[in-house]
Image: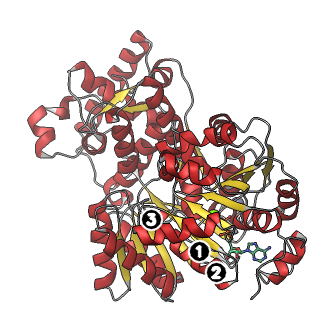
Amino acid sequence: MSVPSRSESPQQVLQRVFGYDAFHGEQAEIIEYVCAGGDALVLMPTGGGKSLCYQIPALVRPGVGVVISPLIALMQDQVDALQALGVRAGFLNSTQDFGQRRDTEQALLAGQLDLLYLAPERLRVPATLELLDRAEIALFAIDEAHCVSQWGHDFRPDYLQLSGLHQRWPQVPRIALTATATAATRAEIAARLDLGRARHFVASFDRPNINYRIVPKDNPRKQLLELITGEHDGDCGIVYCLSRASVEDTADFLSRQGIPALPYHAGLDSGTRADHQSRFLREDRMIMVATIAFGMGIDKPDVRFVAHLDLPKSVEGYYQETGRAGRDGLPSTAWLAYGLPDVVQQRKLINNSEGDAARKRQLSAHLDAMLALCETVQCRRSQLLAYFGEQTGPCGNCDTCLQPAETWDGTVAAQKVLSCVYRLHQRRQHFGAGHITDILAGRSTPKIEQFGHQQLSVFGVGDDLDPVQWRAVIRQLLAQGYLAVESDHGTLGLTESSRAVLFDGAEVKLRRDPERRRPRTAPKQARAQVELPAEAAPVFERLRAWRAGLAKEQGVPAYVI
Ligand code: ADP
Ligand code: MG
Ligand code: ZN
């Protein structure tokens, strides 16, 4: 294939070099703008086609397009793919030996490169800057631009120095691209990269072919297995777990079930990681079980499902990770199993995180938004898109649209839980969700005996709900800020909002979890049929009257006694 001619139009380059008929979305506008020398900030979802937005201007404008990318492991592949199309591309990063670097540098200086991929840390080396000074530069593309955000989990310190490009080469247009896109992140990118005058191109973040589902977690492995065997037999997928250990365990588990699965996390050596990644990209039927270390820049079109076994830390993370499903536009699933331990764990992680109060507040705000998405009774997609500033109606392709969720008045249930915590604190005792559920259910466990908790007024007041339902109540109280995680042991504490529920009659709305397997306890009716001895009834009556009277006297709800 011939070297692209500089006199071609973007449309001609699209067809002749890349073999595509037409631009997608805003590609044509963005490319025209950058070709004309404008700075651009491009926000487009994963798979939206950001690469062409700098590759084509690099071919149309004189000089070499310099692409800054943090994805060192993918540079070789990207360059190979471009070379296969006849584009003169090269890269400079730490994986190369001296000879390889020299060859690329010589090609650059001879004006024989259309695109040069650079790892950001290369720009710390003065020799690299001097090298670029001696070349004609068509544009700078800053890919994965959200890496400049210190709040995000992809932060790369070397990205901060990229604002210096503009000072050194004021005439060269810059295009920053990312799929991470809240208004706050966008503003941060523009500020830190000194892109004050850049035009913003914001594509819709909707991925209509993805079916979003968030289910209550009870037996996550079994639930995952049901998802795979029931709906995605033989498909490619990604399963995200929080810890390296659970990545290993889950990959083992799937393999033992005869489902091809590989682990991927930062604790594996780089050879194993590269091997697993390339097997995942190559093979038709492979499940990657990974921490969030996996996925950025992965372009595998037929990932049919993304499953989360643990709660993502933010809506942006969730969106990025689920966005790796269905890049080919075919129906795909984004499935998340989420439960009480997730909330406790994430709150604990934030409490223990390094950084100042502002950092912790930021992390909490991220988590709160994620929890709101999990607990919503509205369309998941419209809630997700609203987070990115897009207003849409119900989508018809998410769990809440397909099976509307109900709310119920959880005020009394909340009062019971909060009273229990309140009573325990009066005794200077601190417990987690499990023990609190036992107290409400009126179970006699060794711990209950040991602490004499049968004597608490809230003991046994919770037989209207089963333990699974109580855990759902506590999970939602934690998610909505009516309860707080106070210690590393996951013990629960009250908040300002809980006082409003206990003492000021604030109402609590809860989401009813979909029906599912209930623990094997005796059915409610059977218990109700147990007859009390005749002489017991008046005692109960008196007790009830006494409690009600006391409550009235103290002006507190009946359960706070
Ligand atoms: P992003 O970087 O936004 O995640 P990519 O640039 O990797 O997306 O593009 C995703 C896929 O879409 C690639 O396989 C790319 O070749 C393809 N693609 C991009 N633009 C077009 C287009 N105009 N026509 C057809 N395919 C396209
Ligand atoms: Mg990309
Ligand atoms: Zn919907």
User: The disc labelled 1 sits on which kind of residue?
Assistant: Val
Q: To which residue does mark 2 refer?
A: 83
Whole-percent x, y for residue 247 in the image: 33, 66
Q: Amino acid at mark 2?
A: Gln
- Residue at image coords 67%, 77%: 331
Could you tell me if residue 534 is visible in this image?
A: yes
Residue 219 quadrant: bottom left
Q: Position of residue 455 (x, y in %)?
A: 19, 29
Lateral position of residue 508 relative to residue 240, left or right: right
Which of the two marks, 2 or 3, is nearer to us in this view? 2
Does the beta carbon of the residue at mark 1 sit less than 8 Å from ligand 1?
no
Q: Disc 2, disc 1: CB below 8 Å?
A: yes
Q: Which residue is mark 1?
A: 79
329 or 511, nearer to the observer: 329
Of marks 1 and 3, which one's residue comes earlier in the chain? 1
Q: Which residue is mark 3?
A: 294
